[in-house]
Image: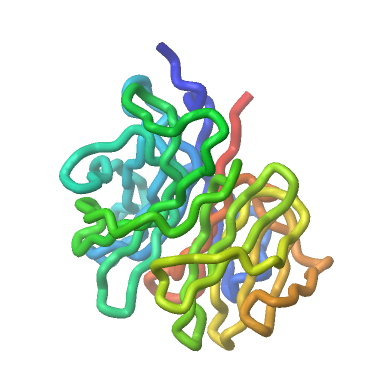
């Protein structure tokens, strides 16, 4: 049976400062793949976590950039030793100690899903040394109808989480990174959220537009002159191994 994600593809471009995107450098890197999130992997290359759109492989997989700038799929992500087809919307963070923290939504997509109609949507985190085999930490938060989490650690050590919701973009915070509470701050539902911390400590939020916060996500200022590649379709930004940033998004092919 064809996957609903079979016509999704991941695209990539480059930005020097994380905000301004030159035209003409966009290229398709992975077909039959959706909801990308990038990071520098243990081998020093760019890795992209994504939801696989190939038949019978629904769940989180990882691809990396090869020496000739091509992309190849490495493997699936395992959570507590097994592949979980109901884990989606991956968001990956490389911690200061070199480990990887994966945040994801656990829903009902393949047989065995435990989410019932009307249940709050749970957002989980998991930790890994190698970026492929993860140990589940705990549920960070559960909110009705949220998806697509994006997590960053702020300069003061606290954590900020953004989630897509049907009516707005919700923000939650945590001092220890384990238990999150909604902050009461929300933004218009102008795409899927991606958070990043700039070198000067400001927080940038990518939707179909760019917002920047100088106070840890309490207030946001729209950047009206900047465009977002993909127009808010599952954006992701990752530090480039040399300098600058790689930027990823998904596109539904005709």
How far from the left and from the top, in percent, is residue 191? Answer: 69, 48
Q: Nearer the viewer, residue 21 or 252?
A: 252
Front residue of 130/189: it is 189
Q: For the N terminus, which image quadrant?
A: top left
Q: Position of residue 108 (x, y in %)?
A: 43, 30
Q: Residue at x 39, y 52 (%)?
A: 48
Task: Tell me: residue 8, above or below residue 175.
Answer: above
**Count of numbered tags:** 0
Left of 141 or right of it: where is 146?
Answer: right
Q: Residue at x 69, y 77 (%)?
A: 218
Q: Where 187 sits versus 61, above or below?
A: below
Q: Residue furthest left?
A: 81
Residue 139 placement (x, y as % from top left)? 39, 55
Task: Answer left or right for 174 relative to 83.
Answer: right
Q: Is residue 88 left or right of residue 233?
A: left
Image quarter in which the C terminus is found: top right
């Amino acid at each position: 049976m064809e996957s609903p994600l079979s016509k999704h593809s991941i695209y990539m471009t480059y930005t020097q400062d994380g905000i301004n995107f030159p035209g003409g450098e966009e290229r398709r890197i992975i077909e039959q793949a959706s909801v990308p999130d990038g990071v520098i992997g243990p081998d020093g290359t760019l890795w992209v976590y994504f939801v696989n759109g190939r038949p019978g492989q629904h769940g989180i997989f990882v691809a990396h950039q090869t020496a000739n700038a091509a992309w190849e799929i490495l493997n699936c992500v395992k959570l507590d030793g097994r592949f979980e087809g109901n884990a989606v919307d991956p968001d990956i963070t490389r911690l200061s100690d070199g480990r990887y923290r994966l945040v994801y939504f656990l829903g009902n997509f393949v047989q065995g899903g435990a989410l019932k109609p009307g249940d709050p949507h749970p957002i989980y985190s998991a930790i890994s040394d190698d970026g492929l085999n993860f140990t589940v930490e705990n549920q960070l938060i559960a909110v009705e109808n949220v998806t697509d989490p994006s997590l960053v650690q702020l300069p003061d050590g606290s954590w900020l989480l953004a989630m897509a919701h049907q009516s707005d973009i919700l923000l939650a915070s945590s001092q220890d990174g384990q238990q999150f509470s909604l902050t009461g701050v929300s933004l218009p539902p102008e795409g899927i959220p991606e958070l990043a911390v700039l070198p000067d400590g400001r927080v940038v939020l990518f939707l179909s537009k760019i917002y920047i916060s100088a106070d840890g996500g309490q207030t946001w200022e729209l950047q009206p002159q900047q465009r977002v590649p993909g127009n808010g379709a599952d954006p992701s930004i990752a530090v480039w191994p040399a300098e600058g940033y790689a930027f990823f998004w998904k596109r539904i092919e005709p």
